[in-house]
Amino acid sequence: MSYERDDRDLLTMFKDGINKGLRVINIRSKEAYDTLKIKNTIRQLERRKRDAVYDMGASVYRTFKHTGKIVEDTVAARCADIDRVESEIEGWREDLNLVHLNARKALGSVMALARPRVAEFCDCGAEVREGARYCGQCYKELN
């Protein structure tokens, strides 16, 4: 009869371990997928910014070369476009930080679920974790 209880406890512990592992994998894979998407978006925006800066410089150079003047309105408009792209990049970086923060929170709750609970106290006064067969302090066999 005691063997049946031990087998059931062992199977429950095994099942709980598998479930915990699957939750961790799910959280980590979602974090990796979201991170990849956001980083790709950031790379595209940084490329767009780099191209905009290059185009602005080329435009200023061509205008100055042909007219001897720099048109401030054109430069201001291009700078405003570059600032918008930089703001968008910063927003995506904040989203990336949130993805990592949410994953850490979710992993913390999974780990909290996996911690063994105190089921009782031994005669010696030590805490006995759920599923334990022996006291961790005095090594007395538990019923």
Image: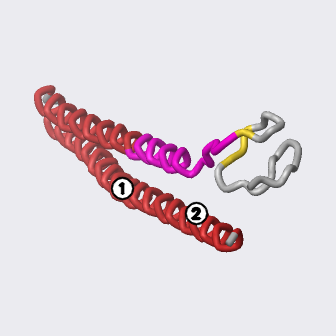
Instruction: Give the percent coordinates (x, y) of residue 99.
Output: 39, 46
For the residues labelled 1 and 2, say whether their Cβ atoms are less than 8 Å apart.
no
Residue at the image point whose x is 54% and y is 44% from the top: 112
Of all residues, the one furthest to the top in this rendering is: 72
- Identify the amino acid type marked 1: Asp
Q: Secondary structure at mark 1?
A: helix
Mark 2, other Cα within 10 Å: few <14 / some 14–19 / many ≥20: few
- Identify the amino acid type marked 2: Gly
Q: Nearer the viewer, mark 1 or mark 2?
A: 2
Residue at the image point whose x is 44% and y is 47% from the top: 106
Give above or below for 139 relative to 98: below
Query: Is residue 115 a member of the stretch shown in magenta?
Result: yes
Q: Quadrant of residue 92?
A: top left
**82 horizontally vs 94: left or right:** left
Residue assigned mark 2: 17
Mark 1, other Cα within 10 Å: few <14 / some 14–19 / many ≥20: some
**43 horizontally vs 84: left or right:** right
Of all residues, the one furthest to the front in this rendering is: 1
Query: Is residue 80 a member of the stretch shown in magenta?
Result: no
Q: Which mark is residue 93?
A: none
Q: Secondary structure at mark 2?
A: helix
Rendered-image quadrant of the C terminus: bottom right
Of all residues, the one furthest to the left in this rendering is: 73
**16 horizontally vs 95: left or right:** right
The total of numbered circles placed on residues is 2
Residue assigned mark 1: 34
- The magenta-colored residue range is 99-120
Q: In front here: 26 or 98?
A: 26
Instruction: Give the percent coordinates (x, y) of residue 49.
Output: 29, 45
Instruction: Give the percent coordinates (x, y) of residue 85.
Output: 24, 40
Q: Quadrant of residue 119?
A: top right
